[in-house]
């Protein structure tokens, strides 16, 4: 069978457009057709912006004809999690409360993508308010995993993961407060990059927890994520957290390899965790051996405060409650039953709890900064388990135990990326995770690419023949 645009990663689409092997209109039409054929099962899109996308694709082609190409995203069709504003297009956050909400201004990252020449195909499904549970029914289903449609893609950037993995866009943006980029990326065989806190603006992005929220790429390859990050990173006067943004060249050093990089393996807290799936553990350890063979050095390291990191993360959900308090008071039925009590839990944390969490966070930060005096990057398995069936997903509690693999790194705001490292015997993707120093996203991506280029896990694609219920 001949390869189509939808089989390519973003890099491949970008190259095909640059060579004029395909036009942006042709690529956009192919993705729109694929959405039409498959998304009735996969349910990755909330809103498809067909007319707007085709208009931007035509404009991109016209610029190309005049010899102007804005960069690697020029004419490339991508999609956005439905908490990122696109002017004139509804933005729901997966919630009945916002079912008819239409922003009048683009988010900062949307403007950056438009400036880069990208074509936005639509707005992607997500867990309700980025904190809900997976849903297969109702107005806002959260998407089905293209590797096994009976399984959840994790959340909350579920639609972003499904669309990118299934070839319903060339790449996507998601958001991450406790793991909502890296978790779904791990479950669907993608690269998921949570940039350094303050590197990418959240203005025009609906909040879950302002001091932990990040926006970042979800793609089929490391180059793809680097190209998207290059477009969206930078200071924004409307988001004060970005005042100190230090943007690097994320593409030029990608092929520098692993040689000379010092890796700290967080073995005690992650690899030796009793609930870690055996196949995930085995694949991750094999991946670390590959990195060692590529010239990286590995040694076991530890940060004792990881043990209390989840206790420090949870009180920040008081920010989530504060954001929703008025709607919970006046329109409680606008929230799903599975979400409402979880948001109310945020009201139970006191000011003293919040201050203690800040102190714990600072202790944890000092420990990790000390580790980075002797290592360049931290590595460990990407998630606790492969994707689970919808009926097996835990529907109670404030946060699933699997968040221990992701949420601590939101507390510190450090760059973290998951990259595919294998498949289970049942054909489900698994990953490793790489964490770096603040604003050193380039080195995080460099190591991810060093692993990716000597393996082929990222090149595997889910079979559309299995997208049936």
Image (cartoon, rainbow, N blue to C red):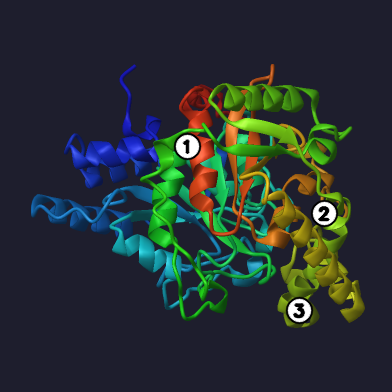
Callout 3 secondary element: helix
- Marking on residue 65: none
Q: Quadrant of residue 240?
A: bottom right
Q: Quadrant of residue 122?
A: bottom left
Using the image as rendered, state which of residue 399 and residue 466 is in the foreground. Answer: 399
Quarter of the picture holding the C terminus: top right
Q: Position of residue 465 (x, y in %)?
A: 51, 22
Left/right placement of residue 270 relative to residue 124 reads right
User: Compared to 352, does 195 lie above or below?
Assistant: above
Q: Which residue is the extreme one toward the left?
A: 66
Q: Residues within 10 Å of mark 1 (few under 14, many from 20)?
A: many
Q: Quadrant of residue 63?
A: bottom left
User: Compared to 297, does 236 lie above or below?
Assistant: below
Callout 2 secondary element: loop
Query: Label 1 vs label 2: CA separation?
Result: 27 Å
| Residue displayed at 59% across by 70% down | 206
- Residue marked by disc 1: 220
Asked if the residue under mark 3 is in contact with the one under mark 2, i.e. CB atoms within 8 Å, the reply is no
Q: Position of residue 297 (x, y in %)?
A: 63, 31
Q: Residues within 10 Å of mark 3 (few under 14, many from 20)?
A: some
- Residue marked by disc 3: 322
Q: Position of residue 182 (x, y in %)?
A: 63, 46
Callout 1 secondary element: loop
Q: Position of residue 242 (x, y in %)?
A: 52, 72
| Residue displayed at 56% across by 45% down | 192
Quarter of the picture holding the N terminus: top left
Q: Mark 3 or mark 1, which has the lower sequence index?
A: 1
- Marking on residue 399: 2
């Amino acid at each position: 069978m001949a390869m189509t645009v939808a089989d390519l990663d973003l890099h491949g689409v970008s190259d095909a457009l640059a060579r004029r092997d395909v036009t942006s209109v042709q690529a956009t039409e192919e993705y729109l057709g694929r959405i039409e054929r498959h998304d009735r099962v996969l349910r990755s899109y909330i809103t498809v912006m067909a007319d707007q996308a085709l208009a931007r694709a035509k404009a991109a082609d016209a610029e190309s004809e005049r010899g102007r190409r804005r960069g690697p995203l020029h004419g490339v069709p991508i999609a956005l999690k439905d908490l990122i504003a696109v002017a004139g297009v509804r933005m729901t956050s997966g919630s009945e409360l916002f079912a008819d909400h239409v922003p009048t201004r683009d988010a900062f990252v949307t403007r950056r993508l438009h400036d880069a020449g990208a074509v936005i195909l639509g707005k992607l499904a997500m867990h309700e308010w980025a904190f809900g549970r997976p849903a297969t029914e109702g107005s806002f289903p959260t998407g089905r995993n293209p590797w096994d449609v009976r399984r959840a893609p994790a959340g909350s950037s579920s639609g972003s993961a499904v669309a990118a993995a299934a070839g319903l866009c060339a790449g996507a943006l998601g958001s991450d407060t406790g793991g909502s980029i890296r978790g779904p990326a791990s479950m669907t065989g993608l690269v998921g990059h949570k940039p350094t806190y303050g590197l990418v603006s959240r203005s025009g992005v609906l909040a879950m927890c302002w001091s932990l929220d990040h926006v970042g790429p979800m793609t089929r390859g490391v180059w793809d994520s680097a190209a998207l990050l290059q477009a969206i990173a930078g200071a924004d006067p409307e988001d004060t957290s970005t005042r100190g943004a230090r943007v690097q060249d994320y593409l030029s050093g990608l092929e520098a390899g692993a040689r000379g990089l010092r890796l700290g393996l967080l073995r005690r807290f992650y690899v030796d965790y009793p609930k870690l799936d055996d196949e995930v553990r085995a694949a991750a350890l094999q991946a670390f051996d590959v990195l060692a063979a590529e010239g990286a050095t590995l040694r076991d390291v530890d940060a004792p405060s990881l043990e209390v990191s989840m206790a420090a993360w949870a009180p920040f959900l008081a920010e989530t409650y504060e954001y929703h308090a008025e709607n919970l008071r006046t329109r409680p039925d606008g929230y799903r039953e599975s979400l409402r009590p979880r948001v109310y839990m945020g009201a139970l944390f006191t000011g003293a709890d919040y201050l203690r969490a800040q102190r714990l966070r600072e202790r944890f930060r000092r420990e990790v900064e000390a580790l980075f005096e002797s290592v360049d990057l931290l590595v460990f398995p990407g998630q606790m388990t492969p994707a689970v069936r919808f009926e097996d997903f835990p529907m109670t509690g404030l946060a699933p135990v699997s968040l221990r693999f992701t949420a601590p790194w939101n507390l510190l705001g450090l760059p973290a990326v998951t990259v595919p490292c294998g498949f289970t015997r049942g054909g489900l993707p698994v990953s490793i995770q790489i964490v770096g120093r603040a604003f050193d996203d380039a080195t995080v991506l460099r190591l991810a690419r060093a692993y990716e280029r000597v393996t082929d896990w990222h090149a595997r694609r889910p079979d559309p023949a299995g997208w049936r219920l």
